[in-house]
Every structure is written in structure tokens, then in C-alpha cells.
Amino acid sequence: MSRKSQEEMLMEWLEIPLSSDDDLECFSDDSIQDETYVAPESVDCDSDSSDEESQVPVIRTEDVSGTRQSDVIMKESTSQLSDNALKLPCSSKNVTKNSRSVVWKDKQLIIPELQSKFHGNTSLPEEVINLNTPYQFFKHIFPSKLFDLIVEQSHRYSVQCNPDRPIDLSCDDIKKFIGICLVMSIVHVPNTRDYWGEVTGTHLIKTTMTVNQYEQIRKFLHFNDNSAMIPRGEKGHDRLFKIRPIIELMRSRFQTIPVEECVSVDEQICSTKARSCLKQYMPNKPHKYGYKLFVISGISGYAHDFEIFTGDENEPEKRVTGEEDLGASANVVVRLSRILPRNMNHTLYCDNYYTSLPLLVWLHKQGIYSLGTVRRNRVPDCKLPSEAELKKMARGASVERVATVDGVDISNVVWKDNKSVMLLSTLAGQQPIHEAGSAAWNSVKEENLKKAWNKIFDTEEKSQGLIENDEQNDISEILGMLKEIYCHECDEEDVHEWMNIDDEDPGHQIMQDSEIVNVVNDKDDAASIASISAPESEDESIPTASEAFTCLDTALRWIEAQDI
């Protein structure tokens, strides 16, 4: 096949308009001023699709020598183009545009401590410091204006349903209703009305509110005006419209706590069996079906902000000015990081669902350091050991590569644990390396090890202590039973004496098999049997067990000899 026919086939395969040889010859390598990789919009970073057409980039070149613009096709084979396509960084159009391939170098990323020092303020406000009881914390998150809103919207909905019979509702009724719901989440019965039943009923619920009042509040409970909702299918429709005021109010209350230095972004699931278009299936979660939430929380576990997944969060009109479109998963981090003060050197952690090169670059430009696990197909052109090579390495081995992407130094480290773990970071690299195992064991005190050992294996002192505690518990239980039957004459000393009345009784002595054989064969004398069978008695007038056994044997032989 001629070279010309190969080029025509290649251009047809790339769906590029054919041009003449004169158009191709009018451009030389010197005339190429600005090469820009344009990634197709349909490329999915996480997709394993074999569609080669969506993965092959087109290198466009602007003609600065004239007004004509042409598409220049690199004179390479199809296999070379496919290889180059796989080397392109998978990112958003804004980050990929006007950028060349990332070059990874064998060096280490070390950020000076002074440069990464946190400058934010994490001191709690006075209103939070003065909170002491759980009810005070509840009132801080759910203020009185929330109950006023619920009363207003519920009353409005009852009027919309039946203007002649509006519901009579107050804030105290809503608080009682929420309290009953909290109790119901702990005490479970088959039916709601069973909480007011004679046998299965809960006294706390029955004395708080009647069943008819509870069902009436549940019937008309509302948080927003239905008449203001935009219909489904029209622009601006909000799937969470009915609970949007509650969500925004709770988010604002959550953000009254200053954001910690280190935060993490991850998803949670609120389990439900309800029929809803918002319900998601996550097979790796303990509760597989439910509403999916994205949460940003600190080391303390406090959630500073959250977002309920509806599927329309990535619409352009919902994006804040200055935020880039980095992809569906990375945009979650972008939205949740809005609460982080800029240029305060916060550190954000996330897993491989969110981490990508464009996200780390964007966060670094906002003054936010980041670190997260990453998938191999999101780090192009990085020469790190493969899975097969890592299996030959010792556990704990690691390799680091560093690249500069859009002026930001990013470290890519692969570390071998039970499985290989790949991380991207703008904060830390491979160094420093510590032997975590030996250092951890050396820091443990001997007393703590002894306590841990005693918890696993019962020592003699512990067993004796357990016996004494069990005996004391038994005495207390028996005294309680005696008091219930109005027997007040017995005290703790009497019960203790009654429980230990048989301690001095030797009872039936248990012999080994060999001892039984010797007794049957009459090979042992009475003295040896006495030494084995029974302990010495202080009172010599009381016969021993061996003597009693001999007498019983003589009596039985005498009875057998009688003609009865």
C-alpha cells in the first residue's frame, strides 16, 4: 500500500476532512507555533471502553503565516497514534488545553514546614463552648426558627388540602413529634399504632401524645410551599425542593464550627427501603440501598458540610464563578471545599474515586494541600513498577516520581502493603520513611502489655477475683428475692453461710481408671486406697471413705450368701 493511500485511510478513520498535498506541504515544522492537545469530550477517565475513535487525539495547528487554518496530521502509523493517545493526561478540557504531556522524574517532593504551616483559626466560638448537655447541642443544630418554619409550612399545607379544617399545631407539638420519632428509632414494634397498645405500648410515647394527634401531624408535616415548586422536566427543577429549607438551615448550623486543619471528603449512605428516584445501590456499603451523601469532615469526625446526591449537581448553572469543570467525581470535592478559607494551607484527603491531577492542581492554586489514593489510569506517562514487579518487592517498599503540572509540583508514590497503593499529593512524598512496626511496639509500656495479656488470658488472680465478684452478685440477688417475699430476717451473713455450708463435705471421691482396676483386682491394700480416696480427718472416730467402702463390700457379699 502506497504512503498516500495510508494517509487517506488514516484521515478517513479519524474523520478528518481530506486536504490536498499542497495544503500539507505548505506547512513545515518551523511554521508550527502552538500545538494543543484537544481531548474528545466523550473520553471517560474511568472507562475501559475499547472504542479507539474516542481515544485518539487530534493535534491542531494554527497557521500564523496566512489567514488559512488547516488540520495537520502527524505522519505516523496508526499504532503510534494509539500509543500517544494513551499517554495524554485524562482531565477536564480547561486543564488539558494548552498543556503538553506530563513528564515524571525520579526525585522526591519535600515541602518546607514553614511553607505548609497552617494559618487558619480553629478556636470554637463562645456559643459552642457553653454547650454542655445533649439537648443543648440539639438546640444548636436545630434552632427555634426551624420549628417555626415547620409549623408555618405544615399549617399552610393543611389549608391547601382542606381550608375548612386547618390543623392546630404549635412548636411544642413538633418537638414532641420529633422526640417520639427518636424513641421509635430505638424501640421497634411491627406497627406504629402498637406504640399506643396496652401490651406492646411504650409509656413515654403514650403519655406524650395521642395516636390520633401523631398521625395528624405526620399527615400534614411539610417543610416548603408546594405551590412554589418548579414542575419536573422544566429548567430549574429541584428534586430536593420539599426539604431544601431544612438542608440549607442544617448546613449553615454545621458551618458555625471552624473548619479543622485536616479534612476528608467521602461518601455516606442513608439506608432506606422507600421508593425514590434518589435511592442508590452501593454494594460495598453495609447498607446497600439508600440516599447517597457526600460529606466533608475533620479528624474529630465532625461533618462541616454535606451534599445529597440527586444527579443534577454538575449542571453549569449551578457552578460558582471561578470553579472549573473537572469531572463529575472531582467536582464533588470542588463544591464541598467552598467552605475552606483560601490560602490557609488546609490539607484535604480523599480516595481514588475523586483524586486526579487536575483536582490537585486546582486545589493547590486555591491554597489547599491535598493527598489521596489514585487509580493508575489517571496518572499517564508515569514509569512506576507494575503489579508484577511490586509482587517481587518486600512489603513496605515504595517508589516515588515527581512532575510539575501547570506550575504545581505533584508527587506520585506507589507503596506495597498487602496490595499496592498509589497516592498523589501536593504536600508530601516518599520521605521521611519510618519503621512503624518496631517503633510502635517499642513505645508500648510493659504495664500496658501485662494488662492486655491479662485481658486475653485469665490469670489465677483474675479468676479468683471473678469468683469473688460472682459470689457477691449471687448473695445480692438472693437477698433481693428474699425481700420480695417479705423475708427480712435474713441478712448477707446468713446467705453467705448457707451458700458455703457444703464446703467441708468431701462428697464422692472420683478415682482414675487405673485405681478402679486395682480395687477390683484386690491388688491394693486398704491403706493405699485410704491415701488415694479420702483426705485425713481430724476426728478419728469418723470412719474414712475406704473403711466405709470395705464395710459395704463385706455387707454385699454377706447379703448374696444369704438364702432369702
Image: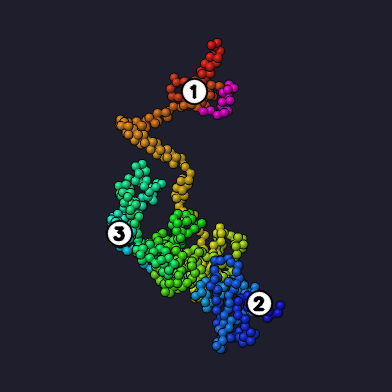
Instruction: Write down the region rendered in magenta.
Output: 510-522
Check disc 2 and report the residue beneath it.
9
Kind of residue at disc 1:
Ala
In the image, taking residue 311 as reference, residue 513 lies left or right, namely right
Residue 88: tell me if it is visible. Answer: yes
Estimate the spatial distance between the alpha carbons at disc 1 and disc 2, rounded to whole Å: 110 Å
Identify the residue at horizontal 31%, vertical 55% (top origin): 174
Q: Distance from label 3 to label 2 (Cα)?
A: 74 Å
Q: Secondary structure at mark 1?
A: helix
Identify residue type, mark 2.
Met
Q: Is residue 421 left or right of residue 276?
A: right
First in sequence: mark 1 or mark 3?
Answer: 3
> Going from the N terminus, do you reach mark 1 or mark 2 first?
2
Residue 363's tag is none
Nearer-the-camera pick, 429 or 464: 429
Give the x, y percent position of residue 186. Answer: 39, 49
Residue identified by numbered label 3: 163
- Badges 1 and 2: C-beta atoms under 8 Å apart? no
Prevalent SS, magenta region: helix
Question: Which sits earlier in the primary sequence, circle 3 or circle 2?
Answer: 2
Residue 28 appears at what percent x and percent y? 61, 85
Disc number for residue 545: 1
Residue density around tag 2, few if under 14, some if 14–19, many if 20 or more, within 10 Å: few
Q: Residue at x 54, y 71 (%)?
A: 42
Count residues near mark 3 (Cα–Cα under 10 Å), then give few for <14, some for 14-19, many for 20+: few
